[in-house]
Amino acid sequence: MNKFNEIWLAILLFAIIPSITFSQTLSIVGDTVVSKTADVDEFWDIYLTTNVLNSSFAISTIKVKAEVIEMPAGHSYDICWNGQCYAATRANWDDGMPYNLAANSTMGEDIFYSHYYATNKDNQTATEGTGKIKYIFYLENNPSDNCSLVATFSFATNSVKEILASEDVEINFDNDVMNVSYSSAEQSTIQIFNIQGKLIDEITFWNTSSYNLNNLQSGSYLIRVINQNKQIATGKFNKI
């Protein structure tokens, strides 16, 4: 091999090897940002699960850890991982045993799930409030190869049971008022359906909207937020 070819081979290997070495093999299957809300008068925990894909051609040994972004007093959470459920805590968590995930496969939702509680060991009375936790799945021998899910958990009265939304959509409740915000310059639409799927009300807005729930009779309702013909949030709430 002449000197010219050796130089080009070295350049080619230099370009290819980093992409092989540092490519991400783990990814979340489904939403990476999730909001869940429960009525504190009816529920004392919120359940969360997710699935992870190993896109490599080899078995990957993965672990999970949790970082508490915010958590009000009186709340806690736990993690069940690879057949074992660990004690509820309020702190960051990174104590689980490694799990071997086969090549080009997903781990299954029974391998990981978490509960977020409106109580803790020091406070047995369910309390309102909102917490946020980041769950990170990573390779044991290469923690920089990872994927994550950020979950927001809310306990409130007269509230949404569960919300799936894009990251820049916020839906919250202040007594009998539902507040919706979305950072977009385009007009958005809120649709409210009864539990049978009949459209009850439709509201257009820019950036923010406040809806008085006293306009509704007592019962369960579905909500959908649309922007540019795309659904950006959906959920369920109760009107007491």
Image (cartoon, helix red, strand yellow):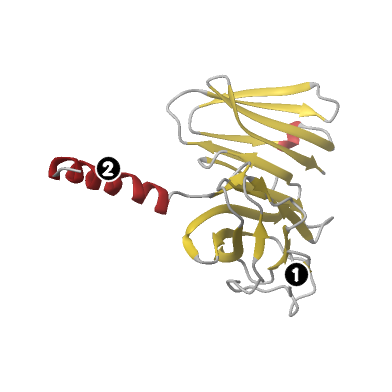
- Cβ atoms at labels 1 and 2 below 8 Å apart: no
Res 12 label: 2
Q: Earlier in the sequence, mark 1 or mark 2?
A: 2
* Residue 7, position as x, y percentages in the image: 17, 45
One can see residue 174 in this view:
no
Q: Residue sitting at 74 percent across and 31 percent down?
A: 215
* Residue 154, position as x, y percentages in the image: 67, 55
Mark 1, residue position: 119
| Quarter occupied by residue 84 | bottom right
* Residue 88, position as x, y percentages in the image: 72, 73
Q: How many other residues sit within 10 Å of disc 2, few (<14), some (14-19) or many (≥20)?
A: few
Q: Residue sitting at 66 percent across and 46 percent down?
A: 105
| Quarter occupied by residue 153 | bottom right
- Which of these two is toward me, 32 or 154? 32
Q: CA distance from mark 1 to mark 2?
A: 57 Å
Q: How many other residues sit within 10 Å of disc 1, few (<14), some (14-19) or many (≥20)?
A: many
Viewport quadrant of the N terminus: top left
Tell me: residue 68, above or below residue 60: below
* Residue 185, position as x, y percentages in the image: 42, 27
